Image (cartoon, rainbow, N blue to C red):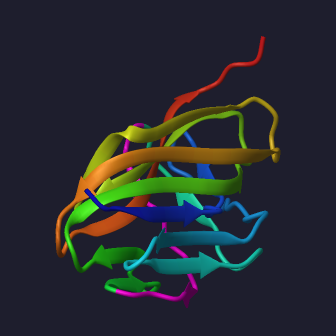
Amino acid sequence: MKMKLLHLANLIAILCSVIPVTAESVNPVATHKMSLIAPPYYGELSVSVGTASQTLTTQNVWYKLTGFTTNGESSETTPDHINDKITVTNGDYYQVSLSGNIVVTKSEVFKLAIYVDGVALPEATQQFLDKDNDNENALSIKAIAYIGAGKAVEVYATCTSKMVRM
């Protein structure tokens, strides 16, 4: 069995709120990358500091994270920064990872997950509690998963609850 490396690095910053938000946004705090790496297959997407922000307006709804700005190196994959995904050309087992930093502007509990063709990888989901506004949150998710030929790899986020300070 060959194993490839799928690396989704340094995500986009998000804001989630229990009620719809129209005027607020969040700024990213780090360089962001999403990539597939390992001979002979690899691919990469990236977004730089301060180039994208995203608002999650409804609690418990998964939102695709958008804002990647650059297609990186690739072989037998198709990085697509316009549609914020990497499509795998050859089905095989991949090490999937997501890492980076995000900032949330309200105290919230939120989750980030790696999706393959619209389905979350249960082993590639992480929950965060941001108890202090505007703190930078480190993110690191890793899993091994079979990804079929033609399948797209993306990142999604949701806000699961509003935290109440005691």
Residue at the image position 65 percent from the left and 62 percent from the top: 10
Query: What residue is shown at x 58% (from left), y 86% (from top)?
Result: 69
Residue 60 in sight in this render = yes
Please tell me which residue lies in front, 77 or 161: 77
- Predominant secondary structure in magenta? loop
Which quadrant, please, contains the N terminus?
A: bottom left
Q: 113 or 50, which lies in front?
A: 113
Give percent across and percent down for residue 134. Answer: 81, 47
- The region drawn magenta spans 60-75
Q: Is residue 18 visible?
A: no
Q: Residue furthest top?
A: 166
Left or right of 134? Residue 3 is: left
Classify 37 as above or below 163: below
Quarter-wise, where is residue 143 in the image? top left
| In this view, 20 is above or below 35 | above
For residue 128, what is the image quadrant? top right
Residue at image point 68% right, 19% down:
164
The residue drawn where x is 50% and y is 72% is 35
Residue 19 is covered by the magenta coloring:
no
Residue 29: percent from left, percent from top: 79, 63
Q: Position of residue 32 (x, y in %)?
A: 65, 69
Viewport quadrant of the C terminus: top right
Q: Is residue 50 above or below residue 105?
A: below
Rendered image quadrant of residue 152? bottom left
Left or right placement of residue 112 versus residue 26 in this view: left
Picture layout, residue 114 above or below residue 30: above
Point out residue 63 in the picture as x, y percentages from the top left corner.
41, 56
Q: How many marks?
A: 0
